[in-house]
Amino acid sequence: MTFLKALNELTDFKLNHMLEDIHMNLESYIISKLGYSVGGNVNIAKSRNDQVAAAIRMALRSELLNIVFKLIDLRRAILKRCGELIDVVMPGYTHLQHAQPVTAAHLLLAHHDRLKRDTDRIRDVYSRVNISPMGSAALATSSFNIDRFRVAELLGFNGLIENSIDAVSSRDFVAEAVFNLSLIMANLSSFAEEVILWSTLEFSFIKLPDELVSTSSIMPQKRNPVIAELVRAKTGSVYGDLVAILSILKALPLSYNLDLQEITPHLWSACSTVSSTLDVMVDVVLKMEFNTDRLIEAVRSGMSVATELANLLVRKGISFRDSHRIVGSILRGRNTLAADEIVEALSRYGINVEIDDVSKILNPFYVVDLHSVTGGPSPKTVGKAINVRLKALTDDEKYFNSLAENIKKYEAKLNNAVSSIINEPQA
């Protein structure tokens, strides 16, 4: 009780840089206030080893919740834009070459779904972060009969890392968390790269607002997509944090080694980078303007409907491989062909098709509508997919809010327990 009261009244505490760390500083402070009979017992049944491991886990769980709520914000922003762009047809690409017609909503939904998996990975790693090492002490627990489960509960942990050697020496949860953060950055950098390409004069698919671009010191016309470029660059920084962590962990003997101290700055660096990157990507998604006329012009110019033209021949009883060969031969070296030219070319192969059927297929809106299977680009299919994802978004938000509330609940429980001891009348 005396010790807790001293901590509660800790107003004149100052770090003494001659002492090794915060733990030694606190112990020295309590001893100076209460003497060795109280302050000298501060470290009974605990060690810096389990305390540091617990502190990292507690701080990391808060960082993960901060990041996951920003992931949810970005997903919400993407789904909002999907609803606005559900009928906007554009080229789909493989190898950065025109492939098949899709919609802008269909493409943005792909970015959303990557971020949904990132959200799920945060949920998964959180369960391995939020477990308590306390009571492990230096490495072998304590001969004092402490209740490790009670300590875990008061600190808001969901359970124990049971083996005490494992508890103080393992930082695989850090590596796993930063690996997941690296995947988030990989997905964001992919999105950022497309933003950079789409904003070029050659593509002209989007326009970024002034606050997301910069000009040149010499070329007055420039609108450089610097925010997206920094997203791309900072991905490498997070990868570097991951590699550094794995390199430090390599070949460490059990149990605690001071090498582990070098891991923590890389963890906080990665968390900070991902958090700020998610913030700016929300801005990018909500503020970029799609040039719908240019998107339609682009999708009409590259014969990305060729696959559907081959499918038309399949429906005439020709094998797909033969259809592929015939259509490829007709289109070789051509970016556009009129319906009558295609009908005439097919007739030379002994294939008779109606010009109306070919004209329909040359319309990318018609082709997109045909692709209505689950996961396809048709507006009807994408509309259903958006609704499913909005429901999943709400569920994710509720789940992670419950985790945040759980931490607050146990913080209050701990504070109440401490207050009841402090306010207990002395005999």
Image (cartoon, helix red, strand yellow):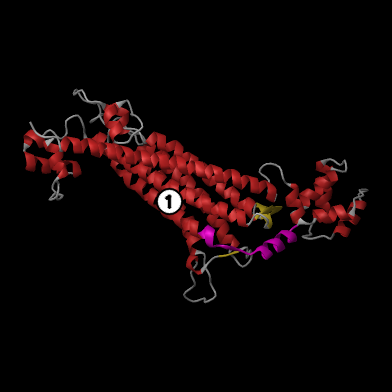
The residues colored magenta run 284-302
Residue labelled with disc 1: 274
Vertically, is 305 above or below 227?
above
On screen, residue 318 versus residue 295, left or right, reads right
Looking at the image, which residue is at 46% across and 53% down?
Answer: 278
Q: Is residue 290 magenta?
A: yes
Tell me where residue 167 appears, x and y as whole percent. Answer: 31, 31
Q: Is residue 45 visible?
A: yes
On screen, residue 200 versus residue 399, left or right, reads right
Tell me where residue 1 appears, x and y as whole percent. Answer: 13, 35
Q: Is residue 133 visible?
A: no
Which of 328 and 338 lies nearest the eye of the viewer?
A: 338
Q: Residues within 10 Å of mark 1 (few under 14, many from 20)?
A: many
For the C terminus, the image quarter is top left
Looking at the image, which residue is at 71% across and 59% down?
Answer: 299
Mark 1 is on which residue type?
Val
Vertically, is 179 above or below 355?
above
Q: Is residue 185 magenta?
A: no
* Local SS, label 1: helix
Provide the major secondary structure of the magenta segment. Answer: helix
Tell me where residue 300 appears, x and y as whole percent. Answer: 74, 60
The residue most toward the front is: 425
Looking at the image, which residue is at 7% across and 42% down?
Answer: 33
**Number of marks present in the image shown:** 1
Tell me where residue 350 appears, x and y as whole percent. Answer: 93, 48
Vertically, is 121 above or below 329?
above
Which of 279 and 388 lies nearest the eye of the viewer?
A: 388
Which of 175 and 358 lies nearest the eye of the viewer?
A: 358
